[in-house]
Image: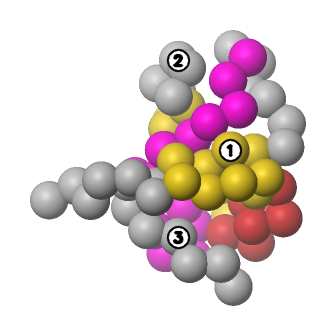
Amino acid sequence: MIKIDVGDILTLKKPHPCGSYEWEVLRIGQDLRLKCVGCNHQMMVARKSIEKSIKSQEKGKDIQ
């Protein structure tokens, strides 16, 4: 299991339809709430499917 924290920026293998590959983590748990960095679209995705599609991970600021 990959260590993912709130505020991290995940670069995925496939782009969002807006063209951005980067997603910000807003909520963690069994599902992750992600926000597209390009168009601010938010979605909930199962942790297992996201872990398979992560290309790189960048530590972001913690939101408090």
Q: In the rendered view, would you say 23 is above or below 38? A: below
Q: Quadrant of the N terminus?
A: bottom right
CA gap, disc 3 to disc 1? 12 Å
Across and down, in percent, residue 61 comes to 30, 53
**Is any atom of residue 63 visible in this view?**
yes
Which numbered circle lies on residue 61?
none
Type of amino acid under label 2: Cys
Q: Is residue 20 magenta?
A: yes
| Image-based side of 23 in relation to 56, left or right | left
Q: Report the magenta residues as a range.
A: 19-33
User: Mark 3, mark 2: which one is toward the viewer?
Assistant: 3
Tag 3 residue: 4
Q: Earlier in the sequence, mark 3 or mark 1?
A: 3
What residue do we see at 45% from left, 58% from top?
59
Residue lying at 73% horizontally and 17% vertically, measured from the top left: 19
Task: Give the residue number, with chain letter if any, for mark 2.
Answer: 39
Q: Identify the residue under disc 1.
A: 11
Main secondary structure found in the magenta portion = strand
